[in-house]
Image: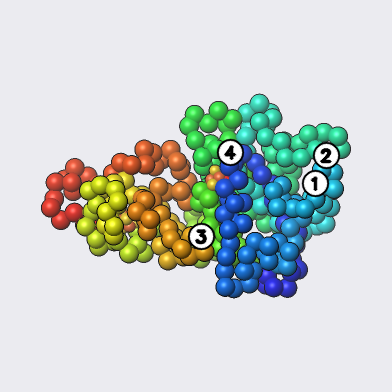
Amino acid sequence: ALATGGGPPIIWIAAANCTGCTVSLSNRISTGHPTDAADLLISTINLAYHPNLMGAAGDLAVQNALSAENSGAFVLAVEGGVPTAFGGRCCYVWRENGQDMTALEVVQRLAPKAAAVLSIGTCASYGGMSGAAPNPTSIKSVQSLTGVSTINIPGCPAHPDWIVGTIAKLLTGANVNRDSSGRPTDFYGSTIHSTCPRRNATWATTFGQEGLCLRDRGCKGSNTRGDCASRKWNGGINWCVGANALCIGCTESGFPDRFSPFLTSAGATPSEHATTTQSCS
Ligand code: FSX
Ligand code: SF4
């Protein structure tokens, strides 16, 4: 589907976020088509607007977005949560007819008209980092703001394959099956813990112990869904647990608050601490 280069234009809006999801997308490296970000952007998808990756700037860029909006069928991708405090004036996305437009205005206008709405990253999907307590800009997720049922691709950042794979599926016209949190089951169908190679290993007692399970150090893998253990990151080089860092729950709603502080035990009860078994199945 991607190889044909057809398909509806994609308007990518940057709301309140760190641009990590765009950086992650730019890191795509694959043996399959599209092989990298340039292949994706130049030969495969019709990206009408992206604040960081497009060649156009200023009025020309905004006109591209507005033409796509008026073309009938477009896909809206939102990166970042949407600030609602102060009339949305913490976050402007572009200038239109001489007026600065907030993410709040643009997302509310475009989402109901889009053929599909992708919430890219945990911020757009659930609030994420940008909506962390005390949430001074009253961030909302795209779905809670607009009432539109979004396809959520969480992760802080989202994996490039999760983004590209979901767009590919949309272009084929196939149904994107989602779980109760709006995530494509193709990528978020199991917990990190259930596929982790350290699942039967002894619990690590400190950091830097190669190959040991990080549960007692605070790993959130048993409460977090994603295929990081098999897919890995940075072109299949490594992943958080593989680098002896723990899973911090970044694909889940409520992240980061629900999983903080990160470096404390993820649910091991005092009685479990007292056992000598110290490995989990
Ligand atoms: Fe949030 Fe993503 Fe984390 Fe950053 O879009 S999911 S802060 S990696 O850039 O929005
Ligand atoms: Fe892997 Fe973390 Fe589960 Fe241990 S707790 S097996 S490190 S995902």
Q: Nearer the viewer, residue 281 or 206?
A: 206
Q: Residue furthest right?
A: 97
What amino acid is found at the position of numbered circle 4 in the picture? Answer: Lys
Decide if residue 234 is in sight here: yes
**Residue under numbered circle 1:** 57
What amino acid is found at the position of numbered circle 2 in the picture? Answer: Glu
Q: Is mark 3 in CB contact (under 8 Å) with mark 1?
A: no
Compute the Cα span from label 4 to label 2.
23 Å
- In the picture provided, is 249 more to the left or to the right than 183? left
Decide if residue 171 is in sight here: no
- In the picture provided, is 274 more to the left or to the right than 189? left
Q: Nearer the viewer, residue 217 or 133?
A: 217
Name which residue lies at 12% across and 53% down: 276
What amino acid is found at the position of numbered circle 3 in the picture? Answer: Asn
What amino acid is found at the position of numbered circle 1 in the picture? Answer: Ala
Compute the Cα span from label 3 to label 1.
29 Å
Residue 140 is labelled as 4
Name which residue lies at 69% across and 48% down: 52
Q: Name the image quarter holding residue 32.
A: bottom right
The spot of residue 198 in percent (x, y) is 30, 61
Compute the Cα span from label 1 to label 4.
28 Å
Judged by depth in the image, the label closer to the viewer, 4 or 3, is 3
Residue 96 is labelled as 2
- The quadrant the N terminus occupies is bottom right
The spot of residue 150 in percent (x, y) is 61, 52
**Residue under numbered circle 3:** 234
Compute the Cα span from label 2 to label 3.
37 Å
The spot of residue 256 in percent (x, y) is 45, 41
Q: Is mark 4 in CB contact (under 8 Å) with mark 2?
A: no
As helix, strand or loop, the secondary structure at mark 1 comes to loop
* Mark 3 crowd level (few <14, some 14–19, many ≥20, 10 Å Cα): some
